[in-house]
Image (spheres, rainbow, N blue to C red):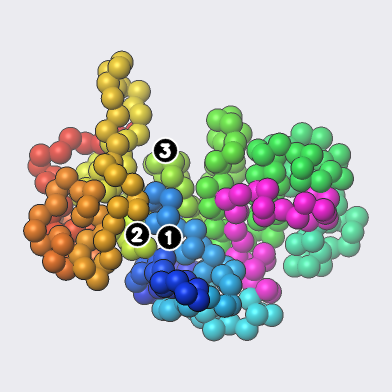
Amino acid sequence: MSLLDVRDLSIVFSRRGRRDVRAVDEVTFSVAAGETVGLVGESGCGKSVTSLAIMGLLPKRGAAVGGSIKFDGTELTSLPADKMRGLRGRDIAMVFQDPMTSLNPVIPIGLQVTEVLRRHRDMDAAAASKEAASLLERVGIPDPARRLKEYPHQLSGGMRQRALIAMALACKPRLLIADEPTTALDVTIQAQILELLKELVVDSGTALVMITHDLGVVAGMCDSVHVMYSGRIVERASRWELFEAPRHPYTAGLLASVPRLDQARGEKLEPIPGSPRDTIPWTQGCAFAPRCRNRIESCTQGAPELVADKLRPDHDLRCFNPIDVAEQEAVTL
């Protein structure tokens, strides 16, 4: 049974005098306890907005959320604010992408970490401070007792990111959403954090939604991968199947643009042509069509549906002219 079940999620942002923006469109996925699911795509494809909808952090005005988001059978889209606050931080936690804007700049790190412990685990001040120091040490912050007294601007970007991760892990949540959790970290600390997240999933049975641009992280962490483009999922499969034989031209383009150790010296990368802004509405055709090398006439005459791949039943695909498995080389990281 799925712990998180997202069905036909749509998010539309409205502003007076401006055209409505559909940031997420008919997104469906589920995450079981102990499973790690990856959401992958370029900036602006709707990954972070999806996570904010799950957390109930979208603004009440100007953002219309449609569809269903169920956590352990509870519908979150209609849950009262006080009950959502009870879930958020205790059962559902999130590591935000930008630590500088996520942490309160005028409150010491210690108070921000202990707040969740005192609210959701009923700890007194002394016990919460001791546990907070242990959490900071666990995520690789040296001299945690001193760091608890410091303000966010006194910490490096990597330390701020680790403090956010410590806050998210404080209550051992049942569902953890990690939005680019290792962006500001060096390689050594990145490996420690990813190992910590793996331990949380294995030891606590936590469901993990990993939002990232780093396909190496996806290859090492995720059980299944959902590739998003322009607000919709265009391909999803197990990580092994996706990396071995991507079927959607967009997925293949993402993989081809990653530097490889076995690549010949001086060989150029193959970026995806254009930019994410070069798109057409899904109501008119495939949003990726203006950038797609496999584009055919039907791509601009109607939107493809997300259906099971004819060649691989467990592989879902939204494409009129997918890449031929027989002709492509295996892609590995």
Left or right of 119: which side holds 252? left
> Which residue in the rendered view is the most extreme toward the right?
126
Residue marked by disc 1: 46
Image disc number at residue 230: 2
User: Is residue 67 or residue 5 the one in the foreground?
Assistant: 67
Span highlighted in magenta in the image: 85-113
Q: Which residue is rendered at x = 41% and y = 72% of the image?
A: 19
Locate residue 146: give its quadrant. top right
Identify whether 7 is placed above or below 116.
below
Q: Quadrant of the C terminus?
A: top left
Q: CA distance from mark 1 to mark 3?
A: 20 Å
Given residues 142 and 33, the one toward you in this image is: 142
Earlier sequence position, callout 2 versus callout 1: 1
- Mark seen at residue 115: none
Find residue 216 and name its label: 3
Dot 3: element:
helix
Residue 56: percent from left, percent from top: 58, 72
